[in-house]
Structure formats: structure tokens, C-alpha cells
Image (spheres, rainbow, N blue to C red):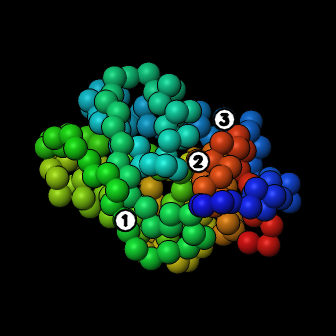
Amino acid sequence: MTNPDMQEIERAMAEADCLVSAEAVEAALDRLAAQITECLRGTNPICYVVMNGGLILAGRLLPRLPFPLEVAYLHATRYGHALNGDLLDWRVRPTQDLRGRTVLVLDDILDEGHTLKAIVEHLKDEGAASVVSAVLVHKLHERKILPDMRADFTGLDLADRFLFGCGMDYKGYWRNAPGIYALKGH
């Protein structure tokens, strides 16, 4: 965003509805970590963090996983700083040899599922033995790319509103908010 209207950015937070407190996010992260640990302990996984949204989730979740794993990142996005969009933009593709590996994909939110579906398919095409996904937020609506699409691990199910905080952004800002907020009127 060039020359952002910082008053608008600050107003978005001031007027937002807090849907999930920082404490409730921490509890969701604990649940996610327990589920992932039960499934992936002993599998020698490589964890791909989807930038930029997955960065906050990874930083808060990975220290809770008490088993060895490798961490890498990829960058695929649909939105950029817009509020919606249709094109998938691969900015950084996976670079590790995935043949025969278990892969965990971490992202902030599963909205319609276009990005996550494309990432999982790509990782499988690269030879991963299995690919599982974890998101902090599953947005509740009927517009998923696949009927009843879900990540393998989900922290929170939330209403179909424009969300920000905990990795999700409003025009590139507020990923750092410790709770999850909904934009007023959206």
C-alpha cells in the first residue's frame, strides 16, 4: 500500500469488533499443537509456512510442537492488499526436496480455499508422501472451492466477516494484533 491513510488504518482497529481475545487465541493454539503433535510426532515433517499470513501462526505454534521438524516457507497469495481477488500469485515456490516427506502447511485462514488447495496440490505434485494443513481460522460460509472443505487442523471457526489480527491483515496492517477482529460493517 503506497502512502497509506494511517487514520483509516487506525480507525479500522478502533471501530472493529473483537471476535476472539488474545487468551482465547492462546487456548486455540494449545489445542492445535496437541492435535498436530498426536498426528505428526515421529514423521520427520517439513513445515511450510504460507507467507505472510502464516508467519504469526508459525511463530506462536511451532514452539508448542515438542518433536523435530524442518521449517521452510512459500509465498502464494490471492489478495495482496485488496479485500478480495481471484488470481493466485506464486511469489516463492517450495525449494526443498519433498519426495517421500510428510508436509505440514501452516496458514492463517481458510476462506474460500483457492490458495490452500493450490498449495496442497503443488506439494503433492512435488512428491510429498502426505500433506496436511493447519489454519488458525476456518471462515464459516458456503463459498468454499470444494464442498465441505476444511484444513486437517483448525483452531477456530468464525463468522463470514472481514477478519484481521493473528496473521490476517487489513490492507497490509494489523497482522500483529494479538486477538482476532472483524472490520466494522464487513
21 relative to 86 in the view: left or right: right
- Residue flagged by tag 3: what amino acid is it? Glu
Considering every residue shown, the one lying at the far right of the view is 15
Q: Does residue 166 appear anywhere in the picture?
A: yes
**In whole angstroms, how far apart are the C-alphas of marks 2 and 3?**
14 Å
Q: Which residue lies furthest to the front in this view?
A: 3
The quarter in which the N terminus is drawn is bottom right
Q: Which residue lies at the image location 33% right of the left edge and 37% below the top edge? A: 72
Q: Report the front residue among 43 and 182.
A: 182
* Quadrant occupied by the C terminus: bottom right
Q: In this view, does 106 lie to the left or right of 181?
A: left
Q: What residue type is labelled 1?
A: Asp
Identify the residue position indicated by label 2 in the image.
Answer: 167
Tell me the residue that label 3 is attached to.
26
- On the rendered structure, is 87 left or right of 54? left
Q: What separation in Å lies between label 3 and label 1 (alpha carbons)? A: 31 Å
Circles 2 and 3: CB atoms closer than 8 Å: no
Residue 17: tell me if it is visible. Answer: no
| Alpha carbons under labels 2 and 1: distance apart | 18 Å
Query: Which secondary structure, mark 3?
Result: helix
- Which residue is painted at 40% across and 74% down in the image? 87
Task: Look at 37% across and 65% down and name the residue there.
Answer: 89
Kindly identify which numbered label has been placed on residue 18: none
Q: Residue under circle 1?
A: 89
Point out residue 51 in the picture as x, y percentages from the top left corner: 44, 48
Which is more foreground, mark 2 or mark 3?
2
SS class of the residue under badge 2?
loop
Under mark 2, the amino acid is Gly
